[in-house]
Image (cartoon, rainbow, N blue to C red):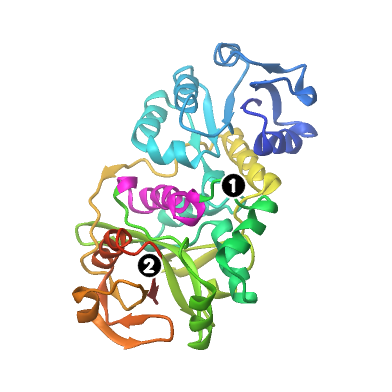
């Protein structure tokens, strides 16, 4: 089966390496923006060379971004070519359009590498859904944020210092906002939740709070109380839709997520009958992520290619039944917080059970008064 790569960066070159010595998958064309000596004989700067080539079976989009990735992927499917992508932003933003187009054209659209990097999360989520109903999904979905939180628990270090180390190691971008504020996790969560619950969720409406304002003093307080703090994503079936959110969460020392080190991920589903099953591994990295791209190509080669679900029903966000206590540190307390405070810790206060959506809305608004505010749900 012949593959065209759209992009030859970290993941694209990894896909090329995985396929180079295989007899069943051949990279025969690579779309590039500048000369790449390693693939000079098969590279092109004109997408038309790919979309009009009848010998190309699969287009693997590993260029990233929304445009022109969306236009290229759409054109490829309209030309009858299967599509594999590692682009979470693309799938989250154009979920309905791309899944509908794949069904209309009778081609595969797979994006296993988009959520979990090297973890085969989406394929196993789709697999269990054929047998069991999913009640809840979530976990650690971003390696950069986990690297930061893990390091801050291992030794006293400021957030800014460990973020700089993460950037030096290549775990964090020069602009780390997507990782530390939750946008990257939210894209992965919306794709996962859509598949788990046959839904179409509005990505921008999912509430979140990141780790940008956590301090080493917060971490010391959590450790003294027997907790570990991790940035977690959650989505659960609700009475009138799906309850989805992202927030720092305080976990007991024996929780699986508490033991996840460095830039690893741990993603979990809970089935009605299957109970809890978790998937652990590298959430990013060249060869792990490229491996899932190649695995998707092999799925198509076996004739099993399709999207992970054939249903996509727009659903509302329903958080009315999700409540738990919160740790809150703020220099600008107000009557609402005082009314919900149950106890005082060294660096902040702890509330009684508060509705999650209400708390996240309060925190988002409160950042205007106190940019140093930090909150964390208590599991």
* Label of residue 134 in the image: none
Specify few, some or many for label 2: CA neighbours under 10 Å numbering under 14, 14-19, or 20 or more: many
Where is 216 relative to 101, above or below?
A: below
Residue occupied by mark 1? 173
Q: Position of residue 10 (x, y in %)?
A: 68, 38
Residue occupied by mark 2? 373
Q: Position of residue 297 (x, y in %)?
A: 61, 35
Does residue 280 appear in this view?
A: no
Separation of residues labelled 2 and 1 (CA atoms): 24 Å
Where is 7 relative to 211, above or below?
A: above
Instruction: Give the quarter of the image for residue 325.
Output: bottom left
Does residue 128 appear in this view?
A: yes
Q: Secondary structure at mark 1?
A: loop
Q: On the rendered structure, is 130 left or right of 168?
A: left
Q: Position of residue 214 (x, y in %)?
A: 48, 68
The quarter of the picture where the N terminus appears is top right
Q: Secondary structure at mark 2?
A: loop
Q: How many marks?
A: 2
Residue at image position (37%, 25%) is: 104
């Amino acid at each position: 089966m012949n593959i065209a790569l759209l992009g030859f960066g970290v993941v694209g070159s990894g896909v090329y390496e995985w396929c180079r010595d295989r007899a069943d998958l051949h990279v025969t064309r690579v779309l590039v923006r500048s000369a790449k000596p390693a693939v000079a004989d098969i590279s092109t700067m004109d997408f038309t060379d790919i979309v009009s080539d009848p010998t190309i079976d699969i287009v693997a989009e590993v260029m990233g971004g929304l445009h022109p990735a969306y236009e290229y992927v759409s054109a490829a499917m309209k030309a009858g070519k299967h599509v594999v992508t590692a682009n979470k932003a693309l799938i989250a933003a154009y979920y309905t359009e791309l899944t509908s187009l794949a069904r209309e054209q009778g081609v595969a659209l797979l994006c296993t590498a988009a959520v979990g990097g090297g973890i085969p999360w989406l394929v196993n989520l789709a697999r269990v859904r054929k047998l069991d109903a999913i009640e809840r999904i979530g976990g650690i979905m971003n390696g950069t944020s986990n690297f930061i939180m893990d390091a801050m628990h291992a030794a006293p270090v400021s957030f800014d210092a460990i973020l700089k180390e993460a950037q030096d190691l290549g775990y964090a971008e020069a602009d780390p906002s997507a990782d530390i504020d939750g946008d990257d996790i939210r894209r992965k969560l919306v794709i996962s939740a859509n598949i788990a619950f046959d839904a179409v969720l509005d990505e921008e409406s999912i509430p979140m709070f990141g780790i940008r304002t956590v301090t080493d003093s917060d971490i010391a307080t959590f450790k003294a109380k027997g907790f570990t703090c991790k940035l977690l994503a959650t989505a659960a079936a609700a009475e009138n839709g799906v309850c989805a959110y992202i927030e720092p969460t305080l976990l007991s020392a024996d929780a699986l997520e508490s033991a996840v080190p460095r830039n690893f991920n741990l993603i979990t589903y809970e089935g009605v009958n299957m109970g809890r099953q978790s998937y652990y591994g590298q959430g990013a990295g060249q060869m792990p992520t490229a491996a899932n791209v190649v695995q998707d190509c092999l799925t198509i080669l076996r004739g099993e290619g399709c999207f992970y679900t054939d249903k996509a029903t727009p659903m509302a966000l329903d958080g009315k039944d999700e409540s738990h206590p919160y740790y809150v540190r703020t220099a600008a307390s107000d009557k609402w917080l005082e009314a919900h405070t149950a106890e005082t810790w060294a660096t902040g206060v702890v509330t009684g059970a508060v509705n999650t959506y209400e708390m996240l809305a309060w925190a988002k608004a409160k950042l205007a008064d106190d940019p140093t505010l930090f909150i964390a749900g208590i599991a």
